[in-house]
Image: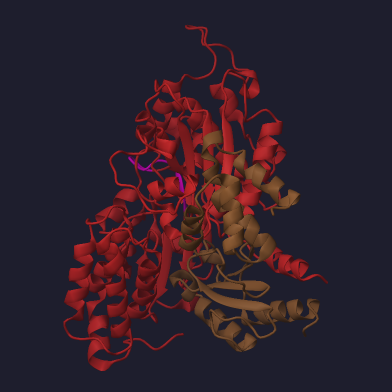
Chain colours: A red, B brown
Amino acid sequence: MKAQHIIDQFRASGVQTCFHGRHIEPQIYAGLDGSNWSLKDYEARGGYQALRKILGKDGAPPNPETGAVGMTQDQVIATVKESALRGRGGAGFPTGLKWSFMPRQFPGQKYLVCNSDEGEPGTCKDRDILMYNPHIVIEGMAIAAYAMGISVGYNYIHGEIFAAYERFEAALEEARAAGLLGDAILGSSFNFQLHAAHGFGAYICGEETALLESLEGKKGQPRFKPPFPASFGVYGKPTTINNTETFAAVPWIIRNGGAAYLACGKPNNGGTKIYSISGDVERPGNYEIPMGTPFAKLLELAGGVRGGRALKAVIPGGSSSPVLPASIMMECTMDYDSIAKAGSMLGSGAVIVLDETRCMVKALQRLSYFYMHESCGQCTPCREGTGWLSRMVDRVENGQGRASDMDLLDNVAENIQGRTICALGDAAAMPVRAMIKHFRHEFEHHVLHKTCMVPAYV
Amino acid sequence: MISDATRARFDKEVAKYPAEQRQSAVMACLAIVQQEQGHLSAESEQLVAEYLGMAPMAVHEVSTFYNMYNLKPLGKYKLNVCTNLPCQLRDGQKALHHLEHKLGIHMGETSADGLFTLQQSECLGACADAPVLLVNDRSMCSFMSDDKLDQLVDAIRAAEGKA
């Protein structure tokens, strides 16, 4: 047997993370089984109905008052605003508002970009969307392009999930062949060319301006903002960037209305959200549930804490988000406002669960190494500071810490935060400060006794 | 020399971008070269630079910035094991150590038979499938228990006549 064939077999035996049937009212993952990603399957699930609707190609009768068919650009944006859809990539910025920033009368080329550079540790939701429901992203992007008067788009996909890039390219071919992308879409006057691009291993390119640099064929070093991408984006042209899951939410909103989307979440936090649960749970995976679902319910869906152990802490929104102790987390609901109120952030929805046997110093050691490794080196506080933090956590973990290290860690982190061009500096600082705040006693134990407070586990 | 087959793949990437923005295809072109040749050399970077109308140094800036480009010849199979926190909590580190033992090399090294290069990697974006292994940049293998790692390595060795 050929070696590549063997590797393919191992590949095929893998991913099962979103076909478990334990979602609650799913919209994006609804009805997926791993084999039904193609255009005809997507259309059988009601796919491209939203695009037909806005273009007036769904067979609906004209508006009795105006005689118009379809939806105007303003109507699409108003619907997305009403839905309270917020950016699913991490920042939670209101999507409709972002779309309204795009200068619609700009005379030159404008661009639409999808950020599928999913590299925030803990996050693996966009991979499953791209692999198993790629057309929902294409339709969402086409609707966004229509609303903002954009004729060219790119989907920049994390290099490590190359199969998702290939799958998305295959879906693009299908959509073009069916007249759903390209010139005169569905016989209308709307043109939209969409292409896929890939990264090749750089966490920083998930930051939107670094992504733009990378898309232009450069190293991914973030740009200073302002100017924001809405005025100076790809090739210096007005550009709107949204996350994969954000675009994927749009077709449902157009089909069912903004109010219906808002109603299935909670005020200011519309719709469903996909959470990637990893770490110490029985059934890690992706779970799509309404915004505002209690964390306890999400944990239950994931089979609870592994081995029946007690929950110690949760990193609720990807590795950059501040860790929360179990007692605080169990009181939270899973939405932007509740997690923010608890002192952390919902981020990308990557929920990393740590049980009672975990050493928090060891956990932070790995994260701090990661941020040092992935700092692009452009800003001194981040380039030097992330290395300093990593070396300090290292020595505490290895029993060479000093009594002053906890205060110094907090101080160095504080001096990185807010002093860099992009958010990677903050992302490196926040986990450190939260760990010291909530689990200082574990660090002190390490310094004093040169060993973990909990049994060794690796 | 860029072969016609390679040039056709390059052309497909370049066609995605405005005519005056050929440089945008550099990431994809370098990935194609790496897939065909195993690594990037100064000569291949030079060819990509000429094809895209870029300064060779601008190409080199890209190849040295992104983690997945191989800047020197590696084993025939590059094994990247994610050890970031979500994977570490589900035996990612253990999988790396297991492979070190199985292959008789440390991470970062290439086995004496030239078959395997073992690397620790940062988040591969498959956190719920840990332990995960990325083979030659393009094949993600999920839930790689020690048994499955052994099976994979043994099967590749057998296929290559080095069992």
Residue located at (49% from left, 50% from top): B55
**Side (left or right) of A9 relative to A357:** right
Which residue is farthest bottom? Answer: A449
Q: Which residues are magenta?
A: A266-274
Question: Vertical placement of A415 versus A117: above or below?
Answer: below
Residue sitting nearer the eye, A136 or B74: B74
Q: Nearer the viewer, residue A94 or A420?
A: A420
- Image location of residue A177, percent across then percent down: 71, 32
Residue A272 shows up from this direction = yes
Q: Main secondary structure of the magenta part?
A: loop
Asked if residue B31 lies left or right of residue A241, the reply is right
* Quadrant of res A382: bottom left
**Measured along the vertical axis of the image, is residue B67 above or below residue A457?**
above
Vertical arrangement, residue A382 with respect to residue A388, above or below: above
- Locate the N terminus of chain A and report the quarter of the image it occupies: bottom right
Q: Could you say where residue A197 lies in the image, as x and y percent from the top left? A: 56, 47
User: Which residue in the rendered view is the most extreme toward the right?
Assistant: A1
List x then y, in percent, for residue A38.
70, 43
Residue lying at 47% horizontally and 53% vertically, measured from the top left:
B58
Q: Is residue B22 left or right of residue A240?
A: right
Q: Is residue A128 visible?
A: no
Asked if the magenta segment contains residue A348, the reply would be no
Q: Quadrant of residue B152?
A: bottom right
